[in-house]
Image: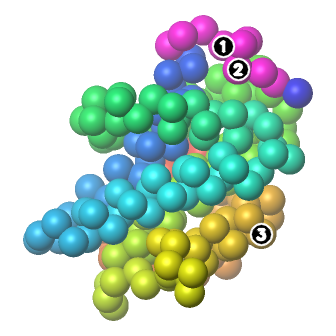
Amino acid sequence: MASLSGFSASELELLISLPYKVGVFVSHADDADGEIDDDKEMAALEACIKAIARLHDDKPLTADIMRQSLSMKTEWPRWAAQSFHVPDEARQAVVLLQGHASETEVKNYCAALVEVATTVAQAYGEFGEFDDEDTSGGIFGGLVSKISGTLSSLSADDANHPMNVSAAEDNALAQLKSALTS
């Protein structure tokens, strides 16, 4: 099992910043007028990173990366400004992980990135708001249950993931998936 201690500071930043950056990358692909979509997408981004960090102890490297991303929230504005580099950085991250982690750990990380990006894309869909709230009042309660059960089976080229996204967001997702599998 790979450990974060085996990576240099710049390698760690690449791995840790990418979950946040992929969400911003997809969010900015189709920026509708107003703030409602941005607010929902950023809330979905944070909720998804939190859920993966909390619910996937069986994938320790990916969960550690997500926890570190959350702990560096003060860096998120800087990372957001760098989000247009996501496809190139995703390729770099895969190559980096292939040199330090098992094939399963690489696949888990890639699946988590795709899950984050897809969650953000669906947060404010083409047909209305993302209203996946649970009855206990927690925002994105249904999102947590989806992530807890699906990340292990997701791959970077999962064709069965439900979509309600714009053409621009779909294109951004395709770019990410291509970068993760090339």
Q: Nearer the viewer, residue 26 or 48?
A: 48
Whole-angstrom CA distance, mark 2 to mark 1, is: 6 Å
Q: Nearer the viewer, residue 77 or 158?
A: 77
Query: Residue 180, percent across and down?
Result: 60, 45
Colour mapping:
rainbow
N-term-proximal mark, 2 vs 3: 2
> Is 159 left or right of 71, judged from the image as shown?
right
Q: Residue at x 45, y 29 (%)?
A: 72
> Is 169 left or right of 180, judged from the image as shown?
left
Q: According to the image, label 3 marks what residue?
A: 149
Amino acid type of the residue tagged 1 in the rendering: Phe
Q: According to the image, label 2 marks what residue?
A: 4
Which is closer to the viewer, label 1 or label 3?
3
Q: Quadrant of the N terminus?
A: top right
Q: Residue at x 32, y 88 (%)?
A: 128
Amino acid type of the residue tagged 3 in the rendering: Gly
N-term-proximal mark, 1 vs 3: 1
Amino acid type of the residue tagged 2 in the rendering: Leu
Q: Is residue 89 visible?
A: no
Mark 1: which secondary structure? loop
Q: Are marks 2 and 1 in contact (CB under 8 Å)?
A: yes
Residue located farthest toward the left when viewing the structure as drawn: 33
Q: According to the image, label 1 marks what residue?
A: 7
Whole-angstrom CA distance, mark 2 to mark 3, is: 25 Å
Specify the segment rendered in magenta. 2-10
Query: Residue 83, percent across and down?
Result: 33, 40
